[in-house]
Amino acid sequence: MEEVTDTIYAIRAGQVDALVVQGKDGHELYTLKTADHTYRVFIETMNEGAVLLSSDGLIVYCNSMFASMVGLPLSAVIGMAFTEFVASQSANAYQNLFRQGWTEDNKIELMTKGATGLIPCQLSVNALELDEGVSLSMILTDLTVQKENQRLLEQNIEQLAQTNAALEISNHDLLQFASVASHDLQEPLRKIMIFAGMLKDRHAEDLPGTSLQQLEKIINSSNRMKRTIIDILTYSRLSTTNDSFVLTDLNELVADVLSDFDLIIDEKQVLIQVDALPTIEVNQGQMRQVFQNLINNAIKFSRAGVRPKLTISSTTRSVLGLGQEMQAPVCSISIADNGIGFNEKYAEKVFSLFHRLNTKNAYEGSGIGLAITKRIIDRHNGTIKAQSEEGVGSTFTIKLSSKQKR
Amino acid sequence: MDTQHKRKILLAEDDSDDAFFFFDFLHNRSDVDLLPSVTDGVEVIEYLNATSSAGDLPDVIVLDQNMPRLTGKETLDHIKSSEKYGNIAVAIYSTYVGPQLIEECLQLGAVIVETKPVTKEGYNKMMDAILEKAVEGRKGENGG
């Protein structure tokens, strides 16, 4: 009887491929090549350890992968309590899983005592109704490679964070430098302007005409330089100050900015059309600057002989998040003109620092305005794009979320 | 205070060109009496301590922010926390004035915090503002 039990165990354990039976006509060979065999091969050759537990936690079946994980022969594993392969730090987790596994499918990560040391595993269990009663089937996935990858990933993330921090410091230093340099440049520049002004005011009549013209050029150049310095300071300060976002009616803000342009709007007879704009969360000072720059450009780069037209319009679109939840609506605001425009191949370049598409003589400016604009929009987590056609006009489109993250 | 009386103005400025501009643009005003300037905050304190009679103290002190030894802000703090000189109106000016400096100095009791002017008109406007605020400050003190 014991021999029969052993044989059945051996068949179950997959150690038996064929049986030789003494029959009437001599020895007969019975292979186990049945539908059952396919499943056995499937279970035996899979990369996961497969174990079947009895209600008292003893191993009634396991595949060779599990046996090789724990470094024991299959025959030795059968009949052992599974707890013997559970590392002490995972004992409690395993006990819980074993208790609950009979009623619900579950999975945990645990440390298994392997052949050469502890192996991190994912263990998933589900109860099986079999002929011999209810058993608990357990699948063990070796997580060593996964854990190693995770560790490498974390290491890389850590390195990235360090590099990022270093970059931030160097970026901060650079901006600090810009700030200090512009500050120190302002001092001598201011003196040049004052002394030149004194010369002009007090000696205009003593100076020959050409000298007076040259003096004017000194003053004009100084004024231009002053504006550039202030723009650089503004640009560098954008990175060093904290952002405070306030719910703002853009209609009011734009009306306010437009009132600063009253004189030039009158002088150039600019046609202005402003549609209803949204009320969204922005840094007011910065957003004022955005509209100042864009409106200034729209008016500045008007075409000779064409009445300048400035159109500010907006659309608002609701957004579904990845989980289909409603997110804050995104507003798209366009500032369009009928000015000289530019070749669209420069559509990206116009936003870079000190990039000018026109000569200084034709159009004044520091070449920083759009860089400041873009940086402000970046700090609002928005986007700005330029579309343009030479001799037709330009449209700048800003996309901003109506709410800012805090 | 006698409004017909010329206000005594003490300037602390380490830059001789800036001191020159200050005097050149303001010396013709009938409402101010420009005292010989000093070059930093320590000298301001020394000047005040050396003035025996309260009537001889300046009515207004104009401080450059960036000075050696004691900066404008530090000098302002020093003056305003003194019982003897706390009433003197103090103005801060600098080549570049950031929002933080403005807030801090106003908090400490400065009458104005301004960017250094670039024209004669600018200097006179600044002085008008200082004198106006200085008078307001006095009235406020008398009232309270």
Image (cartoon, rainbow, N blue to C red):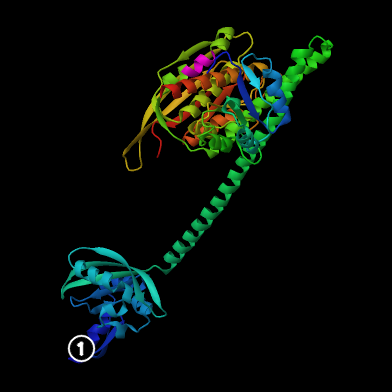
Q: Nearer the viewer, residue A103 or B99?
A: B99
Residue A361, x across and y down, in percent: 71, 19
Quarter placement of the N terminus of chain A: bottom left
For the residue labelled by badge 1, is the local secondary structure a helix, a strand or a loop?
helix
Quarter placement of the C terminus of chain A: top left
> Residue A90 lies in what quarter of the image?
bottom left
Magenta stretch, overall SS: helix
Whether residue A359 is visible here, answered yes or no, is no
Vertical position of residue A69 compared to residue A109: above or below: below
Judge the density around disc 1: few (<14), some (14-19), many (≥20) Cα neighbours within 10 Å: few
Residue A273, x across and y down, in percent: 47, 13
Residue B78 is left or right of residue A281, and the answer is: right
Vertical position of residue A222 compared to residue A124: above or below: above
Residue A127 is left or right of residue B39, and the answer is: left
Residue B115 is left or right of residue A291, and the answer is: right
Residue under numbered circle 1: A4
Report the span colored magenta: A256-261
Residue A346, x across and y down, in percent: 62, 29
Which residue is farthest front? B53
Q: Is residue A264 covered in magenta?
A: no
Vertical position of residue A313 compared to residue A16: above or below: above
Q: Nearer the viewer, residue A123 or B136?
A: B136
> Residue A356 lies in what quarter of the image?
top right
Whether residue A219 is visible here, answered yes or no, is yes
Residue A5 is left or right of residue A356, and the answer is: left
Name the residue rendered at 35%, 72% in the picture.
Answer: A111
Which amino acid does the dot numbered 1 rest on? Val
Which residue is farthest right? A208
- Subunit bearing disc 1: A
Q: Nearer the viewer, residue A134 or A273?
A: A273
